[in-house]
Amino acid sequence: MPKKEELKALILELTREYYKEVHGVAQEFVAGKTKVNYGGRYFNAEEMVNLVDSSLDFWLTAGPWAHKFETRFAKWLGVKYCSLCNSGSSANLLAFSALTAPELADRAIKRSDEVITVAAGFPTTVAPILQYNCVPVFVDMSIEESNIDCTQLEAALSPKTKAVMVAHSLGNPFNLQAVVDFCKKHNLWLVEDNCDALGSEVILELAHSILHTI
């Protein structure tokens, strides 16, 4: 084995040991005392090893690891393509911007068009609407679900409505079927911000029908 491969194998094995020593100690959960964060860095030993492996080859931007992720992730979702972004905010902007393409003719989102979204949500869901000088039309949220109140969608509709752009709040899926039915009924685009709820069973049950109809 070439020396560089021996060194890499040693570094990666030490990385696994480092993870076990520093990050691998499980914290005992005590109801009422253990702090539960909304979000944070969740990773295992192999993910740390992959990170170090990539840095040793100095792949600090998109490269073999990014391509592998896109390929496997698309297969897991059951879709043809997956494009890796630097953040969910950028993904939202790209998705919305794609719907402004002139190739979409009458269905293209134009400046001053209206986009229905939820009043109590993420600013990064609303930001692309404002960046393109479109008008966000806010509907209220359901307190029980902490998500968009789908019963208000029809009241928010106008002749200038072109899309619905909404996120699943804190990993709790909104009523996706109701939103999809509304969009199909009125020939609207749906931009689904799924950063927080990717992998939830409710979404996976509907993923194929939605991705093949919009």
Image: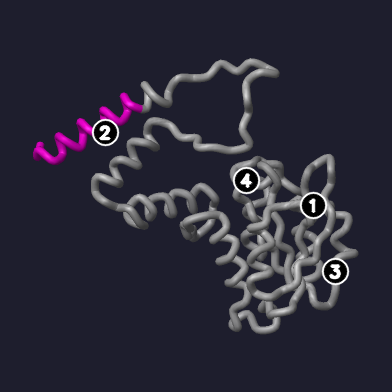
Upstream in the sequence, badge 3 or badge 4?
3
* Residue type pointed to by label 1: Ile
Q: Which residue is denoted by mark 2 in the rendering?
A: 12
Residue 144 to residue 32: above or below: below
For label 3, the crowd category at 10 Å Cα-Cα, with few meaning under 14, some 14 to 19 and many 20 or more, is some
The circle on residue 157 is 3
The question of residue 140 being in magenta is answered with no
The residue sitting at 9% across, 40% down in the picture is 2
* Residue type pointed to by label 4: Asp
Q: Nearer the viewer, residue 124 or 68?
A: 124
Which span is picked out in magenta?
1-18
In contact (CB < 8 Å): disc 1 and disc 3: no
For label 2, the crowd category at 10 Å Cα-Cα, with few meaning under 14, some 14 to 19 and many 20 or more, is many
For label 1, the crowd category at 10 Å Cα-Cα, with few meaning under 14, some 14 to 19 and many 20 or more, is many
In the displayed image of the protein, which residue is found farthest to the left?
2
Q: Secondary structure at mark 4?
A: loop
The circle on residue 148 is 1
Residue 157 to residue 120: above or below: below
Residue 190 to residue 29: above or below: below
Upstream in the sequence, badge 2 or badge 3?
2
* Residue type pointed to by label 2: Leu
Q: Nearer the viewer, residue 187 or 137?
A: 137
Question: CA gap, disc 1 to disc 3?
Answer: 15 Å
The circle on residue 84 is none
Upstream in the sequence, badge 1 or badge 4?
1
In contact (CB < 8 Å): disc 1 and disc 2: no
Question: CA gap, disc 4 to disc 2?
Answer: 31 Å
Give how far across and how far down residue 47 sits, in percent: 39, 37
